[in-house]
Amino acid sequence: MLEQRIQQQFFDSADLKYAAAEILSRPIADAVSAIVGCITGGGKVLACGNGGSASDAQHFAAEFVGRYERERPGLAAIALTVDSSILTAVGNDYDFNQIFSKQVQALGQPGDVLLAITTSGNSANVLAAVEAAHAKEMTVIALTGRGGGKMNQHLSETDVHISVPHERTARIQEVHILAIHCLCDAVDLQLLGEQENT
């Protein structure tokens, strides 16, 4: 019985990935274009999220600053989830909902990208970061699920929304990490392809 339940988890995850492949390939490609434009223009990617999405933000930044699968110079990316002094100071002195937006206000520049990760699309501190990014003339790439939630009302026409067509957090997160790996792979392909052609 336990083994069947475990196998079903694999089957459910695989089924969603097959279903999401066609739906999400276009927005992921659009996100790649936004990131490549940012990086080649001397910008950086700021990433944020809560819980498992915080881990995804850190994973993304690590792959950019270090490497994904191929050797290349480090790419500018910062996870806004890692500085405990900033997070606790802003949370204590202001409000927990400002822990990311304060950092976007301080670190973001026009042309930068915000990678905003929230499985529900409703995380107040992530939505506040999106508003701060817009004020800084940044592009937002939103990774959500469950139809996008409140994120739908916070994005502009120039932003990119990668919304996983599922309701369960675990399944959404599994596709989020695959989408992040797709971003890393395609950005490297674009940047290394440009270097090889120059």
Image (spheres, grey):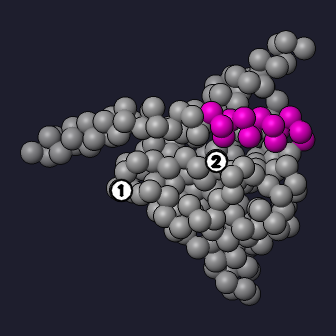
- Give the camera-side residue of 77 and 101: 101
Q: Is residue 131 visible?
A: yes
Residue 173's x, y, as percent? 45, 50
- Give the camera-side residue of 167 and 94: 167
- Give the camera-side residue of 56 and 182: 182
Mark 1 lies on a secondary structure that is loop
124 relative to 169, above or below: below
Residue type indicated by callout 2: Val
Residue at 82% across, 30% down: 73
Residue 55 as seen in the image, left or right of residue 83: left
Residue 181's x, y, as percent? 57, 35
Residue 127's x, y, as percent? 63, 68
Quarter holding residue 93: bottom right
Query: Which residue, as the protein is rendered here, is positioned at the far left?
Result: 1
Residue 95 as seen in the image, left or right of residue 45: left
User: Which dot marks residue 167?
Assistant: 1
Q: Is residue 54 visible?
A: no
Instruction: Give the labeled residue for mark 2.
Output: 160
Residue at 45% across, 32% down: 22
